[in-house]
């Protein structure tokens, strides 16, 4: 690794958006530095098969795909640093980025920090995370063959995950805090029509419990409260999937960049420009709607082109 601390372009984030921005920026001879952050490879590293990324007709494992993205970015000279950016200062150029005890400077910055799945705050949650509790049905559904599982949430993700889980599980119960779904009509209808899906309305999960099995914890019970009556019940679910939305990883940019009420960075239409010239945003950090690897990669490409044109205009 070189010791350079100044770069024409710094990219923050290592999902499809970040690495695609890196491929384009590196091929434009901008010698980008890319900070991989706390989850190198991003959200795709916690999925199994990716079957909807064009170019992989037989599908590819998420972690393997991200290794390929990284290799392609490095091949053209991207310097990947496996560290997290703690703080940024965009008040003047060059921009400053604090990474542990080093200050990096950059003529332009591409944000590709992504989003993180929301989790319910339950007393026993962490004990069963990965041992019955998951935030990704597509990643973990396979492990719940012929079991009874629950999905929390009432949006499109919850309907999609519940429907997907019926491929494996014996029964899927959707636990929703209201008596009406937020999901689109077509997704609702698909779920209502599925005989394996049941609904528990006006309900929230208050805690989980389980037992030790083969040397590790295993979820066996989910405690649910009806928020209208206050009644609590215990259900014998062995899987609990959270589908209650995502939060963008944009905390370090608060107060500097324009964001919507949920913290997604606002970019100008048909561009990745933020309110600060020279700072560009791509991927899930600015997109709560599509949230796909291929759309994130697309905006990463746009950000690199926007950054290159910005740098040219400064010369
Ligand atoms: P979402 O639309 O924000 O829905 C989140 C759901 O979780 C809501 O029903 C919400 O309840 C519930 N929720 C939030 N916090 C909760 C808490 N603390 N306790 C209990 N329940 C909680 O999120 P999403 O379903 O992930 O969808 C995000 C975006 O992606 C949407 O625009 C969606 O249309 C899109 N999407 C599209 C597809 C598709 O078309 N194939 C698939 C997935 C996602 P309330 O309803 O009471 O607020």
Image (cartoon, rainbow, N blue to C red):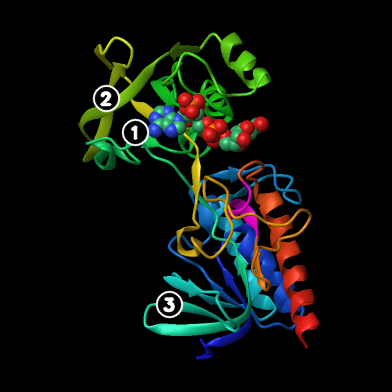
The residue closer to the viewer here, 26 or 6, is: 6
Question: Residue 195, relative to residue 102: is it above or below?
Answer: above
> Which of the two discs, 1 and 3, sits closer to the camera?
3
13 drawn magenta:
no
Earlier sequence position, callout 1 versus callout 3: 3
Marker disc for residue 220? 2
In contact (CB < 8 Å): disc 2 and disc 1:
yes
Tell me which residue sits at (67%, 73%) in the image: 278
The residue closer to the viewer here, 189 or 237, is: 189
C-alpha span from label 1 to label 3 = 35 Å
Marker disc for residue 99? 3
Other residues around mark 1 within 10 Å, as few (<14) / some (14–19) / many (≥20): many
Tell me which residue sits at (43%, 63%) in the image: 38
Find residue 313 and report its horizontal and vertical position in percent.
Answer: 80, 81
Instruction: State the SS at label 1.
Output: loop
Using the rendered view, name the quadrant where residue 224 is placed. Answer: top left
Is residue 83 at least partly visible in the picture? no
The residue closer to the viewer here, 309 or 171, is: 309
Q: Which residue is mark 1?
A: 132
């Amino acid at each position: 690794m070189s010791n350079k601390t100044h770069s024409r372009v710094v990219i923050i984030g290592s999902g499809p958006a970040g690495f695609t921005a890196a491929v384009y920026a590196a091929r434009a001879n901008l010698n980008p530095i890319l900070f991989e952050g706390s989850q190198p490879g991003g959200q795709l590293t916690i999925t199994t098969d990716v079957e909807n990324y064009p170019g992989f007709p037989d599908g590819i494992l998420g972690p393997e795909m991200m290794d390929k993205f990284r290799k392609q970015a490095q091949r053209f000279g991207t310097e990947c640093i496996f560290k997290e950016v703690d703080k940024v200062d965009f008040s003047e150029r060059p921009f400053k980025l604090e990474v542990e005890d080093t200050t990096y400077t950059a003529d332009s910055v591409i944000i590709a920090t992504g989003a993180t799945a929301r989790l319910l705050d339950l007393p026993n949650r962490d004990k069963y995370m990965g041992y019955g509790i998951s935030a990704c049905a597509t990643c973990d559904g396979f492990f719940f063959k012929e079991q009874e599982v629950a999905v929390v949430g009432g949006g499109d993700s919850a309907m999609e995950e519940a429907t997907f889980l019926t491929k494996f599980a014996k029964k899927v119960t959707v636990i929703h805090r209201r008596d009406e779904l937020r999901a689109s009509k077509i997704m609702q209808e698909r779920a209502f029509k599925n005989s394996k899906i049941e609904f528990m309305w006006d309900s929230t999960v208050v805690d989980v419990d389980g037992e030790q099995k083969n040397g590790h914890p295993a979820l066996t019970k989910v405690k649910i409260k009806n928020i209208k009556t206050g009644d609590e019940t215990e259900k014998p679910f062995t899987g609990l999937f959270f589908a209650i939305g995502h939060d963008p990883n944009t905390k370090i940019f608060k107060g500097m960049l324009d964001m919507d009420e949920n913290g997604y960075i606002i970019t100008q239409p048909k561009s990745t420009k933020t309110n600060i010239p020279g700072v560009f945003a791509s991927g899930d950090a600015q997109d709560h709607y599509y949230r796909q690897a291929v759309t994130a990669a697309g905006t990463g490409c746009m950000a690199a082109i926007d950054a290159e044109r910005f740098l040219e205009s400064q010369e």
